[in-house]
Amino acid sequence: MNRELIATTVLQYAAMPLEAPPESASYRVTLFFGPEPVDGQAGVQACVFNVKKRNWKAGIQVTIEISSDQIASLRDTLRLPKRLAQAFESVNEEERPSFETRGGEYFVQALCRCKLDLCLRKGLVQENQRVSAGQLNGELTQDVKLRQEYVFSYIFTELDLVPHGSPPT
């Protein structure tokens, strides 16, 4: 490449407006474990995430709880059983029970990640924390409705399945 072309490219790039990244982009999030039942709280499951903000020296653990009632409600809202049944059409009959169990676990993980993302948008302090099952319920329901394709994509990716009607990648 000649110097004139490089200089023009650099000037064009410098003149481009920079969009602010979403708040959650400044965090690195990893699922640590879950879902698991919460001790002493019947009907509540939790996932634990490691969260590190780019300017923090160390990460934190954030426990996200969700009630079985909200899981069931969102399962119905997103028509999860129907979508999973379509995806499982390509799965061997003997393997389906395992896929169904894991699909349910991945669904809870995706819901917990959506709830964590709501917290990230509001900002987190650098300390381990727990978000109870009763927090952010209305917001979570709305967010999951908006992000349903993320939820299904997460489940299908973790199960290594191509959703019904989608071309293989």
Image: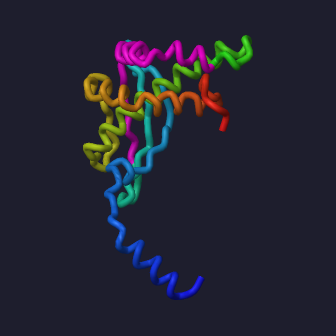
Residue at 51% x, 82% y: name it.
6
Observer-nearest residue: 4 or 151? 4
Residue at 32% x, 34% y: name it.
130
Q: Which quadrant holds residue 46? A: top left
Residue at 46% x, 83% y: name it.
7
Q: Residue furthest bottom?
A: 3
Residue 21 vs 97, above or below: the answer is below
Question: Which quadrant of the rendered structure holds the C terminus?
Answer: top right
Residue 85 in the image, given as x and y percentages of width and height: 59, 14
Question: Which quadrant of the rendered structure holds the N terminus?
Answer: bottom right
Residue 141 vs 154, above or below: the answer is above
Residue at 64% x, 28% y: name it.
161
Residue 119 in the image, given as x and y percentages of width and height: 30, 39
Instruction: Check if residue 68 falls in the magenta segment.
Output: yes
The color scheme shown is rainbow
User: Magenta part of the protein: which range?
Assistant: 60-87
Can you see residue 40?
no
Q: What type of secondary structure mainly makes up the magenta span?
A: helix
Can you see residue 125?
yes
Residue 52 in the image, given as x and y percentages of width and height: 40, 51
Residue 44 in the image, given as x and y percentages of width and height: 38, 18
What is the tally of numbered marks visible in this picture?
Answer: 0
Residue 35 vs 12, above or below: the answer is above
Observer-nearest residue: 131 or 146? 146
